[in-house]
């Protein structure tokens, strides 16, 4: 259904465009006049005060030769105002853009990906210079202050880019007013609003007329709106934010009429700025951006880049056309064209560019993490000290580097040199706080810093951090105390040194203008009251894009990506960047089903070209954490390899109580399993999700299976089979419990728990069918059937996952035991 709807709509776009053109120009003199004008660089402007006319999708229009919006001058929309004649030429050579990234609902807004980050990557490709400053904090008062200060300094911003939400009054809460609107900031009746953040969090709804007044005071001629509903005109013309801005005097508004991929919006903007640097007007630059999207229409999906007609999304409203003649520059003869430069970015930056930047992403590729960037932005501004905690290989270091680049390039620090990196890499002596202070001082003050005594050095660094906005990143911090080098080359810091580090961080938190980001596999609870941010895998959309980038150099892998088992492999990898980076390139020579079997422990893991560090292979990544487990945890943890994605202490307790289980697992109490799972979570092999459940590192099952086999090769196969049978029985008992909860208990909890355990339950259902354990099969399928029906999967086509269930593998059609019989012909005794 859903996978067919897109192509069906795409096929109809051309016909709809022809109908729009015919409805405007007919077949007589008007059409003849249009064709004569088209050859002279026609610009089509729809100018009206009638909202029902201005709101139509004019960008669809086709004239027989192709889309009119992609012509020489394109399509714009305008209000019937008197001052449209001529082009407004804005002085100032260097284009200055103020980006407002507003997420009033916090991480619940992660669906609205930041356009600024992919745009930053592309600004190097455009001619001349674009100064992109991010407004911190993203409040309306901060915007007012920033615009006024820039105008008073004689360097007003040329463009304000609002990346956030637009809200229509009829959708607000409270009848006569807007939920979240400040006193005195109510919008006019029917007027659209923009949702800024309040200083302490939450939404601050600001009417378009108030927003426009601030822009006028700051002498801002152009606005870009990447906001929900911002480009969509409702039944009343003044209800649209874009048209309200024009009505209040803004010269040009470029808006995204519908949802758009962040990478697509960024490429549109790169082409948009490129055109402005050639002396083009905003109208011409919008057309250039649309052409870029039209010619490069691949957008990320789990199956690879899929064509998307999102060149229709950008819309241009103008009161008067705008140009920036003093920003005009020439591209050096040897420089690549814009298309060439953007294609290089889409693949990966050059090794030379990566080598030049110590904060560059590994392999030149960093994807997603907008939700974590938001949390880091808030933490760095308000709490000052944040610990990025998560399992090995989830990309904590790459996230810290990406955020450091982000702050360095968007005004988060007072000077680019004030982004300072310090690694506590195992095997290298850290020297505690003195080591950090010396590294900072020598980097910023030079060799003379070494002549100061320790107290003077610490005082100088504190003075710097208190006076200026700096960002310190402490990487691999787990080696300091929680998880020291297993080889003993660098022992953990003594208690007194740990207290010095803790005291320094609390001073930064309470008295400085700077921030410290710490990466660790552990939570580092001994640090006390600092912000802790959990780092897991990439979300489904991010993982799909990352997979595409990783597989770009491998044509054979691209073909294998189309197989159904690739989706199962991607789900198993759970968005873990290291596991994806080390596993997916093997698709060049290996089927995805084979790689999945190795990760599950069914077959041996392929040999890896392991490097010297603990992140050079999946085995090395797990080994470092595994060495810090207690002896009991190391003995019992292999049972986790039987689960798929999520381990459950209650299921394990039932599992261990069954007769005939291998001695290593038999008789283990629930409390003991709780201790084991918490110990594994402490070192980052598992991630707690509540209710006694833990997400499993994707490389852990294969590693544990190999360790289990190595401990007793002669008995492994028999023990494994016995353990699988016991888990099947435990899952049947678990299914009875959740079914009873659905009927007469807490159904919401039951469905949530099934959601986490659905992959294990599905595997155990298959095991029951294979072994003709019909009673266990019916008990398991009863719970799964209730879950599938509640999630609407009886109406969701194959390979389509509901939005609230990322990573879910659905089945086709209504799923009950009876209607699955035709697909299970080798099990004739089910009934």
Image (cartoon, helix red, strand yellow):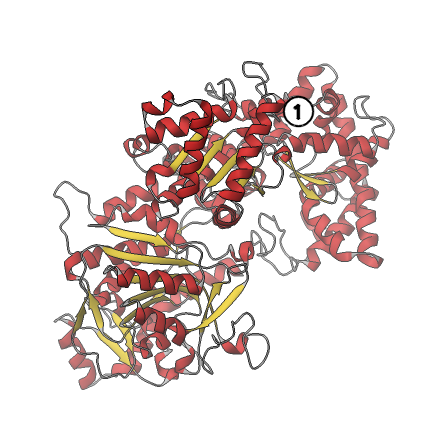
Q: Is residue 520 left or right of residue 814?
A: left
Q: Compared to 669, does 186 lie above or below?
A: below
Estimate the x, y position of residue 48 in percent, counting from the top left: 31, 84
Estimate the x, y position of residue 538 in percent, counting from the top left: 52, 43
Q: Compared to 391, does 71 lie above or below?
A: below
In front here: 504 or 83?
A: 504
Element type where label 1 sits in the image: helix
Residue 158 is at least partly visible in this image: no
Mark 1: give few (<14), some (14-19) or many (20+) Cα within 10 Å. many
Q: Looking at the rendering, which quadrant does residue 231 occupy?
A: bottom left
Image point 49% across, 22% down: which residue?
Answer: 430
Image point 52% across, 65% down: which residue?
Answer: 203
Q: Is residue 685 left or right of residue 181?
A: right
Q: Is residue 453 left or right of residue 176?
A: left
Q: Which residue is identified by label 1? A: 705
Q: Looking at the rendering, which quadrant does residue 7 occupy?
A: bottom left
Estimate the x, y position of residue 620 in percent, counting from the top left: 54, 22
In front here: 170 or 600?
A: 170
Q: Compared to 702, does 336 lie above or below?
A: below
């Amino acid at each position: 259904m859903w996978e067919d709807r897109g192509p069906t709509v795409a096929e109809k776009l051309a016909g709809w465009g022809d109908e729009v053109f015919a409805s405007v120009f007919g077949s007589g003199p008007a059409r003849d006049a249009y064709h004569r004008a088209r050859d002279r660089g026609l610009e089509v402007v729809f100018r009206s005060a009638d909202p029902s006319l201005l709101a139509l999708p004019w960008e669809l229009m086709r004239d027989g030769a192709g889309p009119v919006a992609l012509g020489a001058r394109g399509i714009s929309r305008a209000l019937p105002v008197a001052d449209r004649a001529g082009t407004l030429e804005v002085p100032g050579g260097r284009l200055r853009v103020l980006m407002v990234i507003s997420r009033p609902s916090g991480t619940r807004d992660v669906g609205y990906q930041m356009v600024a980050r992919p745009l930053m990557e592309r600004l190097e490709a455009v001619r001349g210079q674009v100064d992109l400053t991010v407004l911190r904090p993203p409040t309306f008062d901060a915007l007012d202050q920033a615009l006024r200060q820039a105008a008073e300094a004689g360097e007003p911003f040329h463009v304000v880019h609002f990346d956030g939400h637009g809200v229509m009054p009829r959708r607000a809460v409270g009848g006569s007013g807007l939920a979240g609107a400040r006193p005195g900031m109510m919008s006019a009746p029917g007027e659209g609003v923009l949702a800024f953040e309040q200083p302490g969090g939450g939404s601050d709804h600001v009417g378009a007329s108030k927003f426009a007044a601030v822009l006028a005071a700051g002498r801002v001629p152009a606005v870009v709106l990447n906001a929900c509903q911002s480009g969509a005109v409702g039944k009343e013309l003044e209800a649209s934010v874009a048209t309200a801005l024009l009505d209040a005097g803004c010269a040009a508004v470029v808006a995204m009429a519908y949802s758009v991929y962040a990478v697509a919006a960024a490429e549109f903007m790169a082409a948009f700025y490129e055109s402005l640097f050639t002396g083009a007007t905003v109208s011409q630059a919008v057309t250039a951006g649309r052409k870029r999207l039209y010619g490069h229409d691949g957008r990320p999906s789990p199956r690879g880049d899929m064509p998307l007609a999102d060149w229709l999304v950008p819309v241009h409203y103008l009161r008067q056309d705008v140009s920036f003649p003093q920003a005009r520059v020439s591209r050096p003869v040897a420089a690549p064209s814009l298309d060439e430069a953007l294609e290089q970015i889409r693949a990966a930056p050059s090794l030379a560019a990566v080598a030049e930047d110590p904060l560059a992403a590994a392999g030149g590729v960093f994807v997603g993490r907008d939700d974590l960037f938001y949390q880091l932005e808030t933490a760095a501004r308000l709490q000052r000290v944040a610990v990025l905690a998560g399992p090995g290989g989830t990309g904590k270091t790459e996230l810290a580097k990406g955020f450091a680049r982000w702050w360095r390039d968007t005004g988060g620090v007072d000077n680019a040199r004030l982004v300072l990196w310090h690694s506590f890499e195992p095997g290298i002596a850290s020297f505690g706080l003195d080591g950090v202070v010396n590294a900072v001082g020598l980097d910023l003050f030079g060799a003379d810093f070494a002549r100061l005594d320790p107290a003077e050095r610490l005082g100088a660094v504190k003075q710097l951090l208190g006076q200026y906005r700096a960002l310190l990143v402490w990487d691999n911090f787990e080696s300091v105390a929680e998880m020291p080098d297993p080889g003993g080359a660098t022992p953990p810091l003594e208690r007194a040194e740990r207290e010095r580090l803790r005291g320094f961080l609390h001073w930064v938190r309470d008295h400085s203008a700077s921030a410290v980001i710490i990466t660790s596999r552990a939570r580092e609870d001994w640090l006390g009251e600092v912000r802790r941010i959990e780092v897991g895998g990439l979300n489904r959309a991010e993982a799909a894009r990352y997979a595409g980038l990783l597989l770009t150099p491998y044509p054979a892998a691209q073909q294998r990506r189309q197989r159904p088992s690739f989706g199962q492999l991607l789900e198993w990898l759970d968005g873990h960047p290291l596991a994806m980076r080390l596993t997916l390139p093997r698709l060049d020579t290996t089927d995805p089903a084979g790689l999945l079997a190795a990760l599950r422990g069914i077959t041996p893991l392929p040999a890896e070209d392991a490097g010297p560090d603990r992140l050079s292979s999946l085995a090395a990544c797990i080994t470092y954490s595994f060495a810090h487990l207690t002896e009991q945890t190391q003995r019992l943890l292999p049972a986790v390899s039987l689960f798929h994605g999520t381990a459950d202490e209650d299921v394990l307790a039932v599992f261990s109580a069954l007769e005939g289980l291998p001695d290593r697992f038999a008789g283990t109490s629930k409390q003991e399993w709780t201790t084991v799972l918490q110990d594994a979570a402490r070192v980052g092999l598992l991630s707690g999700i509540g209710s006694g459940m833990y997400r499993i590192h994707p490389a852990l099952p294969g590693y544990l299976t190999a360790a289990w086999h190595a401990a007793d090769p002669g008995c492994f196969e028999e023990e494994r089979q016995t353990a699988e049978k016991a888990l099947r029985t435990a899952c049947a008992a678990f299914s009875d419990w959740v079914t009873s909860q659905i009927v007469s208990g807490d159904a919401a909890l039951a469905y949530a728990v099934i959601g986490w355990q659905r992959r294990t339950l599905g595997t155990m259902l298959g095991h029951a069918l294979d072994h003709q354990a019909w009673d266990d099969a019916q008990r398991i399928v009863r719970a799964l059937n209730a879950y599938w029906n509640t999630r609407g999967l009886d109406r969701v086509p194959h390979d389509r996952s509901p939005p609230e269930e990322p990573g879910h593998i659905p089945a086709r059609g209504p799923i009950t035991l009876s209607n699955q019989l035709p697909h299970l012909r080798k099990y004739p005794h089910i009934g």
